[in-house]
Image: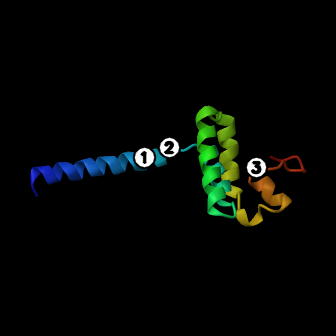
Amino acid sequence: MNMARSASLMRLVLLLTLCLGLVGCKSQCRLLSEKLCDCSLNSNERSNCAALAASREGSNPATAEQENYCREKLATCDCRLIGTAAGKVRCGLARDPDGGS
């Protein structure tokens, strides 16, 4: 392999590593927002929702307490149940009427 090709491959690997690293840096609340966006019925709604989530995260970062809350909800949120009261609680869209979070 010649030096120019080797350098090009190294730049590509570095770029891919950097891109993959950035994907892993999303906050738990951003991931929860994106999961909720995935519950949208059509691709236009999903795209608009994801763009809004990204812009809001930049201007209003979550606190450590909010991140913990989002992490808990991310683990239990299920789009198939989002139309139910229990599903809304599990996704963080409603408060638990029994007093839980």
Describe the element under mark 1 as helix, strand or loop. helix
Q: Amino acid at mark 1?
A: Gly
Q: CA distance from mark 3 to mark 2?
A: 22 Å
Residue 30 is drawn in which quadrant?
top right
Point out which mark residue 21 bears: 1
Residue 59 seen from this side: yes
| Residue annotated with mark 2 | 25
Which one is in front, 50 or 13? 50
Q: Position of residue 94 (x, y in %)?
A: 82, 49
Which one is in front, 67 or 19? 19
Q: Single out the residue that lies furthest toward the bottom.
A: 80
Q: Mark 1 packing: few (<14 Cα in 10 Å), some, or many (20+)?
A: few
Q: Mark 3 packing: few (<14 Cα in 10 Å), some, or many (20+)?
A: many
Specify whether 45 is left or right of 82.
left
Q: Are marks 3 and 1 in contact (CB under 8 Å)?
A: no
Q: Single out the residue that lies furthest toward the right.
A: 97
Q: Amino acid at mark 2?
A: Cys
**Residue name at image x 37 percent, y 45 percent:** 18
Q: Please report whichever mark, 3 or 2, sits nearer to the chain's N-terminal start.
A: 2
Q: Are marks 2 and 1 in contact (CB under 8 Å)?
A: yes
Residue 28 seen from this side: no
Which one is in front, 90 or 11? 11
Q: How many marks?
A: 3
State which quarter of the image contains the N terminus.
Answer: bottom left
**Residue name at image x 71 percent, y 57 percent:** 77
Q: Are marks 3 and 2 in contact (CB under 8 Å)?
A: no
Q: Please report whichever mark, 3 or 1, sits nearer to the chain's N-terminal start.
A: 1
